[in-house]
């Protein structure tokens, strides 16, 4: 991972010096630097023999433009897998300000045009530094007006049990203010690729499903949020649920031999395979009622 960050940062610096001055607009420069970072970062997955990415179902026929991409949040690995699944689409990400201080990786995020949110210790860790949210939202509006999509995790933090946490209102209000669409996505398996509160990573097959754009027009913040929750829960139910690390190893052994472990599209089947997968799916359905 560190090697990919170092390579990405150096390539971005070289591009900033030798290529970006000849690009016609700031938008083109921002997109180009972002593409470099996402493509190089995707090799964190593709060169890792223990991580496998599978797309479930089709993706939208056209790339998102004036769009907020929203996804559930399970792990620190989520952004790696989501950005790889979205390639070749370039999307800007919202991340904790502390991450931008990480050598090479954080510096590359800054060059890519990702946006920082400055949390404080207030309100049990959910406070934000005064004056920073408005500035970030203005930059988000600028990106959306230039048809540059933004990816956010609307729960605000990682879930420990796989169920969606309550969504924050801010980005739904942003969607209404800019008349932007929302593209719901769902993933599973990243909680095994990089378990929450753990520094060590593990083997995993990660499944990603991309939904259909939801227009924000004619919605209120609460109705838009409820619709996104409903769509995201449906996407989650379409995903196979990894059960244990041994089961993932079995999947990799059975399927990797046929297709070399490459990213591949599979048909959603509503379960993780076998009776155990159905049991986990039924448990999730009972514990996660759809909003009224």
Image (tube, grey):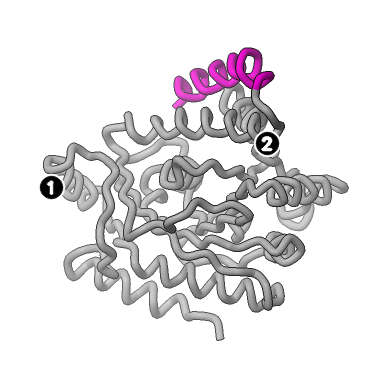
Residue assigned mark 1: 254
In percent of the image, x 45 and y 63: which residue is there?
211
Residue 285's place in the image compared with 211, above or below, is below
Residue under label 2, please give it: 27
Looking at the rendering, which quadrant does residue 285 occupy? bottom left
Q: Which residues are magenta?
A: 1-22
Residue 244 x/y as whole percent: 27, 54
Residue at x-position 61% and y-position 59%: 154
In-image side of 174 versus 195 (left or right): right
Of residues 22 and 237, which is closer to you in this image?
22
Cα distance between the residues tagged 2 and 1: 44 Å
Q: In this rendering, would 3 be left or right of 248?
A: right
Question: Residue 1 at what x, y percent from top left?
Answer: 44, 27
Residue 18 shows in the view: yes
| 120 is higher (above) or lower (below) than 10 | below
Crowd band around label 2 with a 10 angstrom C-alpha radius: few (<14), some (14–19), many (20+)? few
Residue 103 numbered mark, or none: none
Q: Name the residue nearer the viewer: 162 or 199.
A: 162
Point 34% across, 67% down: residue = 238
At x 65%, y 14%, the residue is 17
């Amino acid at each position: 991972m560190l090697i990919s960050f170092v390579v990405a940062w150096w390539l971005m610096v070289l591009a900033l010096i030798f290529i970006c001055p000849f690009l016609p607009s700031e938008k083109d420069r921002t997109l180009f630097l972002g593409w470099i970072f996402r493509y190089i970062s995707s090799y964190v997955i593709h060169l890792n023999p223990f991580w496998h990415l599978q797309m479930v179902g089709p993706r939208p026929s056209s790339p998102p433009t004036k769009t907020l991409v929203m996804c559930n949040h399970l792990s620190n690995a989520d952004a790696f897998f989501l950005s790889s699944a979205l390639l070749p689409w370039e999307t800007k990400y919202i991340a904790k300000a502390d991450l931008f201080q990480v050598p090479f990786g954080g510096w590359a995020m800054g060059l890519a045009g990702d946006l920082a949110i400055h949390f404080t210790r207030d309100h049990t860790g959910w406070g934000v530094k005064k004056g920073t949210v408005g500035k970030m939202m203005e930059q988000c509006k600028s990106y959306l007006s230039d048809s540059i999509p933004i990816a956010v995790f609307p729960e605000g933090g990682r879930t420990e049990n796989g169920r969606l946490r309550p969504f924050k209102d801010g980005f739904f209000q942003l969607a209404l203010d800019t008349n932007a669409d929302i593209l719901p996505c769902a993933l599973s398996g990243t909680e095994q690729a990089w378990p929450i509160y753990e520094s060590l990573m593990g083997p995993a097959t990660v499944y990603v499903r991309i939904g259909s754009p939801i227009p924000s027009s004619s919605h209120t913040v609460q109705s838009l949020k409820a619709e996104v929750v409903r769509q995201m829960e449906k996407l989650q139910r379409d995903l196979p649920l990894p059960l244990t690390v041994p089961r993932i190893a079995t999947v990799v052994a059975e399927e990797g031999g046929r297709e070399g472990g490459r990213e591949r599209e599979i048909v959603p089947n509503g379960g993780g395979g076998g009776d155990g997968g159905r049991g986990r799916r039924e448990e999730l359905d009972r514990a996660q009622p759809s909003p009224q």
